[in-house]
Image (tube, grey):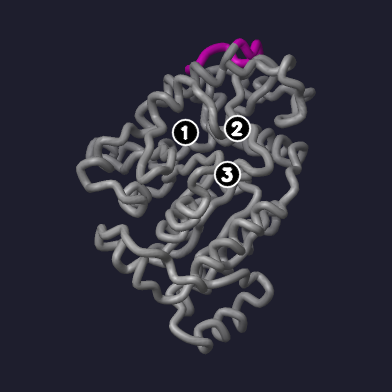
Amino acid sequence: MKMAFVGKGGSGKTTLAALTARRLAGRPLLAIDADINQHLAAALGASEDEAVLLPALGDHLDLIKEYLRGDNPRISSAHAMVKTTPPGRGSRLLTVSETNPIYERLVHDVGGIPLAVTGPFATEDLGVACYHSKVGAVELLLNHLVDGAGEYVVVDMTAGADSFASGLFTRFDVTFLVCEPTLRSVGVYKQYVGYARDFGVRVHVVGNKIDDESDVDFLRAHVGDDLLTWIGRSGFVKAAERGVFSGRLEPENASALDKIVKTVDLCTKDWPTYTRQANEFHLRNAQAWASAKVGEDLAAQIDPEFVLGTLRKDEQHVA
C-alpha cells in the first residue's frame, strides 16, 4: 500500500515518514524521498556524507525509462517516455521487494530501510530546470508499481501544495497530512484537501508537536473528523534529530504510529481508478507540452485495455 506524508514545510512530515518507515522495518517496504529538501536519509540515520553519496532517481531517468518501457509497442523509445507515461501490455512492472536494475542501482539500505531519493535541486538546475522534472522519476515508478496488502511504500512529499504540480498526489492509497496546531499549518491543510478531495484522495491529518489537550482541541476545531491521531513532544525524536538513535519511542507515540499503519492496512485497492487517473493526467501533459516536446502524439501511449494490478503474471512483462 502506498502512503504519502505531506504538510507545511517544517511541520515534521519527514520525521513522521521516517518514524513510520522504522515502524514497518522487516516487512516488504520501499521508502522514497521526493522532497526538494532531501532529509529523509538523515532522519533514518544516515550521516551527512552517506546521504550525499546516495544515487538520485532524477539523475538516472534513462535507466528507469528504458527498464520500464520493456517491449510495450505503444512506446516508441525511452526518449518518448515522460513522467506521466502509463504502463501497458509489454511494460515492465515493479513490485515493492524484488531484484531489478533500478533497485540494484538506486535503492540502498539506510538504517535498515530500503530508500530511494529523488535528488536535491542542484546548482546547475538554477534558472533552467524545475524540481518537478526530478520528481517525475517517482511518478514513473509509482505508475508501474504493483503493490498489495502487507507491502508498503512510504513517500516523503514536497511541502504544501507543490504536490499538485503533477499527478503524483493521486498515486497513493492514503495521504497523511502532518499538521502543527497553528493557523499556518491548518491553512495548508485546507488548501490541500480543497484540491485532493476533487480526485477522491484519502486524506488523514496527523497532528505533530502536540504539547497538551488544548493543541488537540485546536486541531479538532479546524480539521474535524480528518484528525486521525497525533504525536506528542518526544525525547526520542529530539535525540534522533540530533543524530542520536537510541532508546525507544514513547508508548503513546508508538501507538499513534500503529494507528497510521492500521489505517493503511484497512484500505482497499482501486486499480481501475488508479489506472484511469494515470491516463487522465498523461493526456493533460500530452496536450499541454509533452507531445510537442517529444515530437509525437503521446496520447497514443495509453493502452485502453490495460488496468494495472489486474493482469495475471503470464500476461505481464515483469523481469
Magenta portion: prevailing SS class: loop
Residue at (45% x, 40% y) in the render: 135
Please state which amino acid type lies under the numbered disc 1.
Ala
Question: Quarter-wise, where is residue 87 in the image?
Answer: top right
Mark 1 or mark 2, which has the lower sequence index? 1
Q: Mark 3 or mark 1, which is nearer to you?
A: 3
Q: Which residue is mark 1?
A: 137
Tell me the SS state at disc 3. strand
How many numbered marks appear?
A: 3
Left or right of residue 5: residue 204: right
Residue most extreme to the left: 49
Q: Mark 2 or mark 3, which is nearer to you?
A: 3
Residue 299 percent location from the top left of the image: 66, 25
What is the spatial separation of the Cα atoms under label 3 and label 1, in whole angstroms?
18 Å
What is the spatial separation of the Cα atoms under label 1 and label 2, in whole angstroms?
12 Å
Q: Is residue 153 visible?
A: yes
Residue at (41% x, 24% y) in the render: 104
Residue at (39% x, 72% y) in the render: 234
Is label 2 in contact with label 3 (beta carbons under 8 Å)? no
Q: Which residue is mark 2?
A: 145
Tell me the SS state at disc 2. loop
Quadrant where the N terminus sits is: top right
Name the one closer to the observer, 152 or 138: 152
- Please give the range of residues in magenta: 71-79
Q: Which residue is mark 3?
A: 152
